[in-house]
Image (cartoon, rainbow, N blue to C red):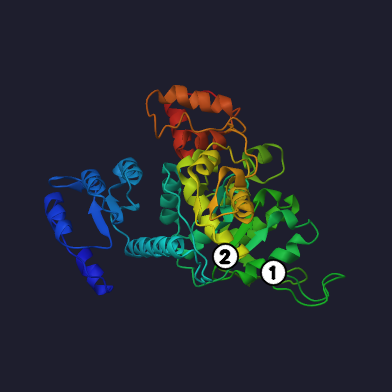
């Protein structure tokens, strides 16, 4: 079935019935991509990856796996697999992952060319780099799972982790990708202006309304409306927001009739909204309407293996922006980057790399090029040393320890344990852990 799909989409594909046949085929011919089942008649995808590693072959591998084997697929990522796909295979998702493989190969080839020629070819396209740490892989799996649906998604993460990039990724992988993506900073909306900014207004409806205004909801019709830092949304506007989401209608300020809107909502916050609800600052009914699906964006300190990958991406960006020709980062500098806590996450890393590219004397970022970075800290008591993904034993004790570290904050505890919050709730109930 997959071979026929490949042929219909313009790819030449070879089918192998098992690992032995695959080894023989790979030894005779060159391929640009390997799509392998995790379970094979004469072995498994992990064994195939190990064999490729021994041979020094760098062909990208996508592992296909059943839902129950996702953790094994994560192990495959650690061994060098490019990505994994859950079965049954979604053709559109498969096509996207293939494009990601070829885009990464193109970027890597371009990077090697720059290192050889010390030149940077003009490229105005916006590139994306994907992390490969277990937490990053889990996040991308959740993005791919929810993107094709119409569910409202809440993106949770610390400041600077790239929550808007996650929202854009969901939009671009949805059936609304051809529609608009409208991003709104809720922190900039005052109680007086928020209804007008969100729902629009009629000319003359208030003193400064000198002309009709469309509003963010109408602008996002047919696409996605991203509400950043939704916890800052004025309380007086939250009821209007809830009505608009439930009825899929808006009423511009100064009008008496409703307008139909077709909008998918993605929100983001670095605030504990459960605490905001308890303090009366956020409506509980709106919260439940917005978090039909939660995606946690891990802090950079929990994805140490991705630091060098992100740093090189930001180095290439800085080269283009600053017209520099820095082609690498020294081992000493990489060690310093990986031993820092990154309280500002990806935003801070990008700023550090840009500054380092600017101050580098030669073509390499050295330890001296970097600003002063202190040794790695745990930052608010959050660190990944009790992850249930890496250490599944003694689950109850680890969950209790995580909850104690973050003073009962279940969102932070789930991030610390490297599981989603729903799983944490289930385990708390399973073990009868008192809160």
Q: Which mark is residue 134?
A: none
CA gap between label 2 and label 1 equals 36 Å
Q: Nearer the viewer, mark 2 or mark 1?
A: 2
In the rendered image, residue 397, in percent from the top left (x then y), is placed at 45, 22
**Quarter-of-image position of residue 17:** bottom left
**Contact check, label 2 and label 1, Cβ < 8 Å:** no
Of the numbered discs 2 and 1, the one sitting upstream in the chain is 1
Left or right: residue 6 compared with residue 353: left
Query: Which residue lies at the image location 66% right of the left edge and 40% below the top edge?
Result: 277
In the figure, is residue 130 to the left or right of 286? Answer: left
Residue 348 visible from this viewpoint? yes
Residue 152 visible to an observer of this rendering: no
Nearer to us in this view, 103 or 290: 103
Query: Residue 305: x, y in percent?
Result: 45, 42
Q: Nearer the viewer, residue 42 or 289?
A: 42
On the rendered image, what quadrant is the C terminus found in? Answer: top right
Kindly identify which numbered label has been placed on residue 320: 2
Instruction: Report the residue marked by disc 1.
Output: 215
Toward the right, the furthest residue is: 207
Numbered disc total = 2
Is 231 placed above or below 259 here?
Answer: above
Nearest the eye: 62 or 29: 29
Classify residue 358 by image quadrant: bottom right
Q: Residue 211 appears in which quarter of the rendering?
A: bottom right
Is the N terminus in the top left, top right, bottom left or bottom right quadrant? bottom left
Residue visible at 58% across and 70% down in the picture: 221
Label 1 residue SS: loop
Q: Secondary structure at mark 2?
A: helix
């Amino acid at each position: 079935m997959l071979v026929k799909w490949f042929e219909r989409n313009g790819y030449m594909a070879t089918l192998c019935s098992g690992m032995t046949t695959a080894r023989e085929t790979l030894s005779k011919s060159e391929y640009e991509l390997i799509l392998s089942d995790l379970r094979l008649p004469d072995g498994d995808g992990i064994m195939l990856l190990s064999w490729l590693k021994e041979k020094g072959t760098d062909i990208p591998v996508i592992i296909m796996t059943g839902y129950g084997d996702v953790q094994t697929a994560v192990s495959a990522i650690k061994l060098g697999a490019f990505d994994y796909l859950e079965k049954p295979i979604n053709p559109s998702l498969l096509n996207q992952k293939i494009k990601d493989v070829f885009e990464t190969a193109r970027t890597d080839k371009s990077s090697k060319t720059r290192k050889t020629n010390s030149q940077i070819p003009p490229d105005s396209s916006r590139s994306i780099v994907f992390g490969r740490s277990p937490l990053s892989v889990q996040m991308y799996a959740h993005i791919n799972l929810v993107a094709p649906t119409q569910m409202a998604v809440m993106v949770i993460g610390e400041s600077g982790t790239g929550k808007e990039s996650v929202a854009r990724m969901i939009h671009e992988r949805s059936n609304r990708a051809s529609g608009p993506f409208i991003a709104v900073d809720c922190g900039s909306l005052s109680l007086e202006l928020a209804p007008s900014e969100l729902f629009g207004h009629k000319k003359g409806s208030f003193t400064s309304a000198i002309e009709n205004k469309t509003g963010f909801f109408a602008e996002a019709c047919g696409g996605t409306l991203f509400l950043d830092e939704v916890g800052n949304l004025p309380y007086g506007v939250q009821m209007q927001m809830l009505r608009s989401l439930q009825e899929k209608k808006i009423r511009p300020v100064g009008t008496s009739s409703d307008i139909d809107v077709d909008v998918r909502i993605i929100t983001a916050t670095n605030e504990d909204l459960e605490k905001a609800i308890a303090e009366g600052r956020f409506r509980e009914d709106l919260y439940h309407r917005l978090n039909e699906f939660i995606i946690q964006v891990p802090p950079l300190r929990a994805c140490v293996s991705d630091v060098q990958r992100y740093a090189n991406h930001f180095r290439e960006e800085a080269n283009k922006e600053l017209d520099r020709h820095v082609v690498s980062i020294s081992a000493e500098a990489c060690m310093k980057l990986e031993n820092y806590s990154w309280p500002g996450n990806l935003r801070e890393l990008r700023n550090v790399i840009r500054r380092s590219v600017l101050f580098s004397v030669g073509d390499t970022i050295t330890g001296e090029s970097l600003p002063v970075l202190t040794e790695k800290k745990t930052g608010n008591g959050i660190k990944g040393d009790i992850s249930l993904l890496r250490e599944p034993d003694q689950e109850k004790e680890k969950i209790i320890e995580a909850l104690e570290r973050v003073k009962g904050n279940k969102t932070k505890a789930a991030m610390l344990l490297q599981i989603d919050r729903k799983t944490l709730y289930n385990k708390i109930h399973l073990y009868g852990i008192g809160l």
